[in-house]
Image (spheres, rainbow, N blue to C red):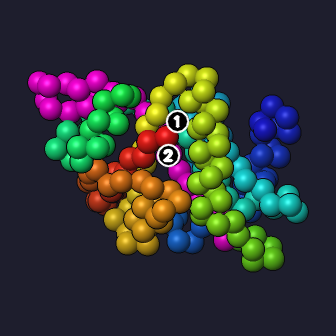
Amino acid sequence: MLDTVGEDEVKSILSDFSCLKNQEIEDFLLKNAIEFAKRKMSITYLVFDEFLQLVGYFTLTHKSSLIPIEMLSKTSQKKLSMHAKLDESINCFDVSAFLIAQFGKNFAVADGTTVSGDHLMDDVFSILAEAQHLIGGGAVFLECEDNENLLSFYQNDNNRFKLYGERISKKEDKKYLQLLRFF
C-alpha cells in the first residue's frame, strides 16, 4: 500500500484508527507499523469493510522461539516435533514460527460497525496459509495480556490456540501469556 498510494496517504488512513481497549494496539499502528514494514521487520495488513472503512488490522512476522517441552501436552510435542528441533541439552523445542505480532479492531468506525475478531483471525490464517505454501512451516504463536476475555477468544473453537507459557515484560511490568497453534 505504501508503494501504491504513498506514505502520507497511508498515515492519513491510519490516523482514524482507535483501540481504547488496548493503547498498545493503537500505538503500534500509528507509530511503528510503517517503519517496521519499510525495514521488512513485519508486515501489517489493513482490513477494510465494504465502505472502505478501516475496521481492523494485524501484523505478521516470523520469529524463533524456545518452547520448554514440559509446557506442552504429548500431542503438542508430537506436532511441534514436525516443525521444530528438540534441543535436548535445555529440553526445549527451538522453533521458527509465524508470529501474530499485533491484532486489533478499530472502534472509531463512523457507523459503529466493527469486524468480528474471528473474521480477522480467518484473514490472518488465509495469509499464513499462502506463506506456508511458499516457504513451509506449520506453527503460529502470539502473546497476549493476561486477560480472561482475550484468552477465551484465542482459545475458542474457531481460533484453537493453546497456552504454553508466559513472559514477564520488565520494561512494561506486565505479564504476557504465550499461545501456540498448528496449521
The stretch of residues the image draws in magenta is 84-107
Query: Residue 79 shows which numbered tag?
Result: none
Horizontal and vertical percent position of residue 149: 43, 72
Dot 2 alpha-carbon crowd within 10 angstroms: few under 14, some 14 to 19, many 20 or more? many
Horizontal and vertical percent position of residue 167: 27, 51
* SS at badge 2: strand
Q: Quadrant of residue 4?
A: top right
Residue sticking out furthest to the left = 89
Q: Are marks 1 and 2 in contact (CB under 8 Å)?
A: yes
Q: Relative to 43, does residue 116 appear above or below in the rendering?
A: below
Q: Relative to 1, does residue 39 appear above or below in the rendering?
A: above
Nearer to the camera, 178 or 169:
178
Three-letter residue code for mark 2 = Ala
Three-letter residue code for mark 1 = Thr
Residue beneath disc 1 = 61
Residue beneath disc 2 = 101
Horizontal and vertical percent position of residue 141: 42, 44
Q: In which quarter of the image is residue 67?
A: top left
Q: Quadrant of residue 36?
A: top right
What's the residue at 52%, 36% (across, down)?
61
Nearer to the camera, 98 or 6:
98
Horizontal and vertical percent position of residue 112: 75, 77
Mark closest to the chain's N terminus, 1 or 2 = 1
What's the residue at 40%, 65% (across, down)?
151
Q: Relative to 83, does residue 7 appear above or below in the rendering?
A: below
Q: Does the magenta stretch include residue 91?
A: yes
* SS at badge 1: strand
Residue sticking out furthest to the bottom = 112
